[in-house]
Amino acid sequence: MSLELLEIPDDVLHWPGWLERQLVGLHLRDLVAQLKLISDNRPSPTIEEVCGEQLEQLLQNGLVALSVRQIGRSSGFNGMTLNYPHSAFVRLERTKARRETFA
């Protein structure tokens, strides 16, 4: 498994392009698994709830049409700090350590 979460750009303006590359890349399964590990287990919002009136713009222009908040809300980055890569790494390492303890 690759640690895709550690590659999230620090600059939130680069999130749309990064996320679009992940959606069509070879490691999407790894990214989804990592997001599940660090998620707060709240139900995911629908695309209509996330995009609102911008749904048509999303369909025409891609994720660049959404705000950083909307991207975070739709991708499981809810409540993450701007120090996200470090936070994700710490959570992933803790989960890995727990699994090794019980293995």
Image (spheres, helix red, strand yellow):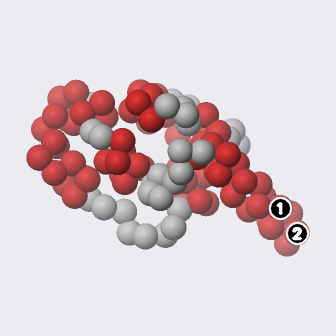
Q: The disc labelled 2 sits on which kind of residue?
A: Thr
Residue at the disc numbered 1: 97
| Secondary element at tag 1 | helix
Proximity of marks 2 and 1: CB atoms separated by less than 8 Å = yes
Question: What residue does disc 2 label?
Answer: 101
Front residue of this view, candidates 65 and 100: 65
Q: Is residue 76 above or below residue 101?
A: above
Q: Tell me, yes or no, if residue 24 can be seen here.
A: no
Q: Amino acid at mark 1?
A: Ala
Q: Residue at x 16, y 51 (%)?
A: 52
Q: Can residue 54 be spotted in the picture?
A: yes
Q: Secondary structure at mark 2?
A: helix
What's the residue at 52%, 54% (across, down)? 80
The tag on residue 67 is none
Residue 73 figure quarter: bottom left
In the figure, 27 relative to 96: above or below?
above
The answer to which of 19 and 83 lies nearer the viewer is 83
- Name the image quarter holding residue 37: bottom right
| Residue drawn at the location 38% of the way across and 69% of the way down | 43
Q: Residue at x 85, y 72 (%)?
A: 102
Q: Is residue 59 above or below residue 37?
A: above
Q: Position of residue 8 (x, y in %)?
A: 56, 36
The CA distance from mark 2 to mark 1 is 6 Å
Using the image, determine if residue 12 lies above or below residue 93: above
The residue sitting at the front extreme is: 82
Quadrant position of the N terminus in the picture: top right
Q: Is residue 62 left or right of residue 43?
A: left
Residue 71 position within the rendered picture, expressed as x and y whole percent measured from the top left:
36, 45
